[in-house]
Image (cartoon, rainbow, N blue to C red):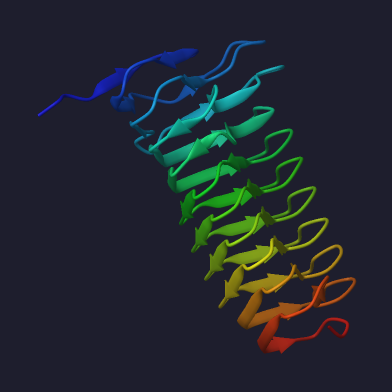
Amino acid sequence: IEPRTPIASLPYTITQPGSYYVESNLTAAVGSSGILIVTNDVSLDLQGFTLRGATNSAYGVGMIGVRRNILIRHGTIRGFTVGVDSPGADNSRYEDLRVGSNRGDGLRIGQYGVVENCSVMENGGDGIDGYQGCVMRGCVVSSNTLNGILVGADSTVVDCLAQDNTLAGLRVGDGSTVERCQVLRSGTSGIILYRNSVARECTIQNALQAGILVTNQSNLIELRSTSSEPI
């Protein structure tokens, strides 16, 4: 069995595939960042600890280039420009994270990424920003300055709570599915659907604009309830 590699200080660069874990709460120095991943097939366990940024800290966990099969789990990331900056990480997973109070986006993820049981709150950009084919399951996105969840085509958002986001609660690309979500007090529309998308068994309340904004044709909408403006 390959042993796990400890991370005891920031910044830290992961250059080899394998399993890594954080030993304690870690704070980045001014102008420095957190953990940089430059390889594929990495598991990073924060073990319930916090990565905390400082002035001009770019990312809590970041990646260079196209990466695959990355797992980041179980901890808190706060105070960076971007909490997790991984738009080139395909087929990757993010589990049991608390990502908040970052100056830009909370989570930026690549195509076919899975985000599960994460709380993403009070970030200065989008809560979660993903590409096509993403899955969001059991997440809470709250009080983010832009959208709560913004994902590309053929994505799925299930059992999530989006509340008090400045723009839309949920914004999904063509061919996407939104199921059993609660969307509360959105600054624009509660849910924005693009072509051939489905919203099913959702509750939408107190959106300032439309409860659901449909931007194209061939959408299926089956609401649980809404107290916002008409669809």
Residue at the spot 65% in from the left edge and 27% down from the top edge: 80
When the figure is inspected, residue 202 is found, relative to residue 169, above or below; the finding is: below
- Quarter of the picture containing the C terminus is bottom right
Q: Position of residue 127 (x, y in %)?
A: 67, 48
Instruction: Name the foreground residue: 150 vs 144.
Output: 150
Instruction: Name the foreground residue: 40 vs 83.
Output: 40
Q: Position of residue 87 (x, y in %)?
A: 59, 36
Residue at the spot 76% in from the left edge and 61% down from the top edge: 164
When the figure is inspected, residue 56 is found, relative to residue 52, above or below; the finding is: above
Residue at the spot 79% in from the left edge and 69% down from the top edge: 185
Instruction: Name the foreground residue: 168 vs 74.
Output: 168
The quarter holding residue 83 reads top right
Q: Position of residue 224 (x, y in %)?
A: 64, 89
- Quarter of the picture containing the N terminus is top left
When the figure is inspected, residue 198 is found, relative to residue 148, above or below; the finding is: below
**Can residue 52 be spotted in the picture?**
no
Q: Is residue 191 left or right of residue 1?
A: right
Q: Is residue 217 left or right of residue 115?
A: right
**Can residue 81 be spotted in the picture?**
yes
